[in-house]
Amino acid sequence: MIRTPRAGTLALALLLFPAAAGAQARPSNSTAPRVPSAEEVRGWMTELQQIGARLQAAHSRALQDPQLRRAQDALMRDMQEAMLRVDPELDRLADRARAIPLEVQGAQQAGDRTRAAGLLRELQGIQQRVMRAEALVLRQPAFAARTRGYEELLRREMTKSEPELDRLLDRSRDLKERVERVLRQRRQPEGPRRRTP
């Protein structure tokens, strides 16, 4: 059966980043955004990791509830089956994805950077294909409703051990948007360059 890195924490990921379920990113109001310093971005990343650790701990505590655990297991099982109906090759690709890291390590040890880069591109392609199948399944009304129901159960249970859950989720989304904005700015070309004679 296919195993995605997010399979065990799909609903947590959806709570953190609703964009994974098809939400649109909010447009920026600023025409020329201030470029944050590298130190500021590192601070955001550190805070994101700290929040992520708190949320993961609350998630783990929540899953000690047998009813929630059963609901998660059933949702993940049905989700995987639905993803395989969308893309029957995912099981084979999952096996391939598990083999790639070892091949990358071997290529790096052999000094074959071209092969290592090609393998990483292959892995990225597999991950994108899994995410596409997951997104298609989550757009189905029955799965969307079921996921929302599970998220509510999860949120209630997580709030019992993490009273600041909503604030942490909001802050996490804000930080993620900031980091993604910086990454987009860095990927943008600097504009046309003048040729010098």
Image (cartoon, grey):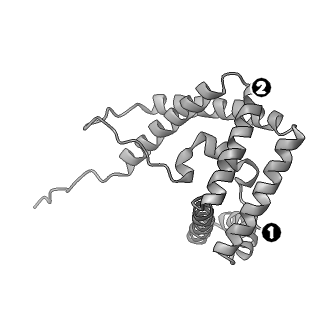
Of the numbered discs 2 and 1, the one sitting upstream in the chain is 1
The percent position of residue 88, horizontal first and vertical second, equals 69, 77
Compared with residue 13, is residue 171 higher up or lower down, i.e. above or below? above
- Side (left or right) of 68 relative to 84: right
Q: Position of residue 24 (x, y in %)?
A: 44, 48
Question: Which residue is at the front of the view, 36 or 154?
Answer: 154
Res. 103 visible in picture: no
Residue placed farthest to the top in the image? 163
Identify the residue shown where x is 35% and y is 42%: 27
Quarter of the image where one finds residue 161: top right
At x 83%, y 40%, the residue is: 63
Reading the image, the residue beneath label 2 is 160
Secondary structure at numbered mark 1: loop
State the image coordinates of residue 59 (x, y, percent, origin top left). Answer: 76, 37
Image quadrant for the C terminus?
A: bottom left
Q: Residues at badges 2 and 1 in contact (C-beta under 8 Å)? A: no
The residue depicted at 60 percent of the width and 40 percent of the height is: 16
The kind of secondary structure element at disc 2 is: helix
Specify the amino acid type for callout 2.
Lys
Q: Residue at x 68, y 42 (%)?
A: 151
The numbered disc on residue 1 is 1
Q: Nearer the viewer, residue 46 or 111?
A: 46
Disc 2: CA contacts within 10 A as few (<14), some (14-19) or many (>=20): few
Q: Is residue 195 visible?
A: yes
